[in-house]
């Protein structure tokens, strides 16, 4: 290097230093994390939560995470007979954080409550000696299946409260700060493989659903250091939901899928007594069903017989065959089903053989069924059926609308509901049933 070049380089270096000597520079905030969790969580769950929180803060904010202590580390210390209880006061937390040259600390408490996570957090500015905020956040719906957005609100609050701080520093201070900056690794492109039955649809990883090809697996790359929750669906199978944590290493997730029920049984009741049993079969699992049902007023057909021969409010058995379909997935808390079918009603005289009932003997069923349960196989239901039939009864009813009792609409009470006569057409609108059904 000749003298002119050396002189020019020296002047350029002095000029560059002079630009920063009295200027401003944005310094990232240095954050220390205290993590506490309830005793209901095991050590593995605590570690997953802590790692997930750190990964989300590192990936989505501009802060530098210098260190952290949590319940899982405390438990490990107790096992190694070097118990170090978590600090409880603001002064103790500030002292520990200052040892790592942090200028703020974050306290996060996670408490399981009724299969949910209650999250509370406090953010303290050590340099300003003030509490920035203390908030509660909505957690995951299921402790076993943590959503990737579990920390979204908390991370957003930290990012908003801890922007990079502008400081006036000299060149020596710049060099010292740069030497102290820790590089936080942001993990991208971690290989993930999901194994499931061909034709399975997976939602929750990408904007569009993934479909498992014939070889039974699909591979993709996802950001690491995060927890994912996916929903897995396939025709004729129960939907599945599962959560998993993706770290730095490639991960393979095998999905266990259960076929939907093929058969089922039910016990139903009206507002008098338990009045029916049903068996049903799913030609299309989880969607289309056929049902054979028998209903009777059991308490009224048992001895002693204290009714006369034409008391049609007792000693009845009704058989029906229906076909229907469900309108919501098999794991929904609420499910709606529609059905259509036919019924036949039999009467058992005290001193005779069974015969078609002279009143409302046969006709059509139109049913609406509303199921509710958190279980996929054991469910409670409320049902309403509309029955339509032609009148077969020729006995006159005296005192109703003159000589022709069927000229107008007549309403009579029956054990199976109120019946409306519209000339020769009989219609029952309000036949409600409560019941319990199990899928086998």
Image (cartoon, rainbow, N blue to C red):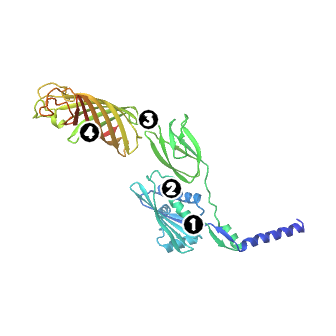
Quarter residue 24 falls in: bottom right
Q: Up-down: is 396 above or below 190?
A: above
User: Could you tell me if residue 83 is visible in this image?
Assistant: no
Q: Which quarter of the rendered picture does the C terminus lie within?
A: top left
Label 2 or label 1, whichever comes before in sequence order: 2
The image quadrant that residue 210 belongs to is top right
SS at badge 3: loop
Residue shown at 88% from the left, 65% from the top = 1
Query: Is residue 205 shown to the viewer in this render?
Result: yes
Answer whether labels 1 and 3 touch (C-beta < 8 Å): no
Image quarter for residue 102? bottom right
The nearer-to-camera label among 4 and 1 is 4
- Would you say the residues marked 2 and 3 are in contact, meaning their CB atoms lie under 8 Å apart? no
Residue on which disc 4 sits: 430
The disc placed on residue 162 is 1
Q: Which residue is mark 3?
A: 236
Residue 287 drawn at (x, y percent): 40, 35
User: Is residue 399 found left or right of 70 in the rendered image?
Assistant: left
Q: Label 3, label 4: how many angstroms apart (C-alpha)?
A: 33 Å
Q: Bin the neighbour count of mark 4 within 10 Å (Cα to Cα): few under 14, some 14-19, many 20 and up.
A: some
Q: Is residue 379 left or right of residue 196?
A: left
Query: Is residue 330 shown above or below 42?
Result: above
Nearer the camera: disc 3 or disc 4? 4
Q: Earlier in the sequence, mark 2 or mark 3?
A: 2
Instruction: Determine the CA span between mark 1 and mark 3.
Output: 51 Å
| Disc 2: CA contacts within 10 A as few (<14), some (14-19) or many (>=20) | some
User: Between disc 4 and disc 2, whose residue precedes?
Assistant: 2
> How many numbered marks, from 0 up?
4
- Distance between the alpha carbons at the discs numbered 2 and 1: 25 Å
Residue underneath mark 2:
48
Identify which residue is drawn at 54% across, 64% down. Answer: 158
């Amino acid at each position: 290097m000749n003298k002119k070049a050396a002189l020019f380089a020296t002047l350029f270096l002095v000029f560059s230093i002079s630009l920063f000597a009295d200027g401003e520079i944005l310094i990232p905030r240095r954050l220390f994390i205290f993590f506490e969790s309830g005793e209901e969580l095991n050590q593995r769950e605590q570690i997953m939560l802590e790692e997930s929180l750190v990964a989300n803060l590192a990936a989505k904010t501009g802060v530098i995470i210098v260190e952290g202590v949590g319940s899982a580390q405390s438990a490990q210390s107790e096992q190694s007979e070097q118990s170090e209880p978590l600090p409880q006061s603001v002064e103790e937390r500030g002292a520990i954080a200052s040892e790592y040259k942090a200028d703020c600390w974050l306290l996060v408490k996670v408490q399981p409550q009724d299969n949910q996570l209650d999250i509370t957090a406090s953010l303290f500015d050590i340099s300003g000696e003030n509490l920035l905020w203390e908030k509660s956040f909505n957690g995951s719906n299921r402790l076993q299946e943590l959503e990737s957005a579990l920390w979204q609100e908390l991370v957003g609050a930290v990012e908003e409260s801890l922007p990079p701080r502008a400081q006036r520093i000299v060149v020596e201070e710049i060099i010292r700060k740069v030497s102290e900056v820790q590089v936080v690794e942001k993990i991208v492109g971690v290989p993930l493989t999901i194994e499931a039955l061909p034709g399975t649809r997976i939602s929750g990883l990408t904007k569009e659903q993934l479909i498992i090809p014939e070889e039974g697996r699909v591979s993709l790359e996802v950001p690491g250091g995060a927890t994912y929750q996916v929903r897995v669906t396939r025709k004729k199978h129960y939907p599945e939901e599962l959560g998993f944590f993706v770290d730095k290493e490639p991960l393979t997730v095998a999905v266990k899928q259960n076929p939907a029920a093929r058969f089922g049984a039910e016990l139903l009741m009206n507002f008098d007594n338990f009045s029916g049993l049903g068996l049903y079969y799913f030609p299309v699992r989880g969607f289309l069903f056929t049902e054979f049902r028998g209903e009777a007023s059991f308490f009224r057909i048992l001895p002693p017989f204290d009714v006369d021969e034409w008391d049609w409010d007792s000693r009845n058995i009704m058989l029906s065959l229906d076909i229907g379909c469900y309108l919501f997935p098999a794991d929904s808390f609420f499910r709606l089903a529609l059905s259509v079918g036919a019924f036949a009603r039999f009467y058992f005289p005290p001193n005779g053989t069974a015969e078609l009932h002279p009143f409302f003997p046969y006709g059509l069923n139109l049913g609406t069924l509303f199921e509710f349960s958190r279980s996929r196989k054991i469910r409670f239901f409320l049902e309403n059926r509309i029955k339509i039939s032609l009148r077969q009864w020729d006995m006159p009813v005296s005192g109703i609308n003159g000589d022709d009792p069927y000229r107008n609409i007549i309403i009579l009470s029956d054990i199976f509901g109120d019946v409306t006569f519209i000339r020769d057409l009989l219609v029952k609108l309000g036949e409600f049933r409560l019941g319990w059904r199990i899928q086998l």
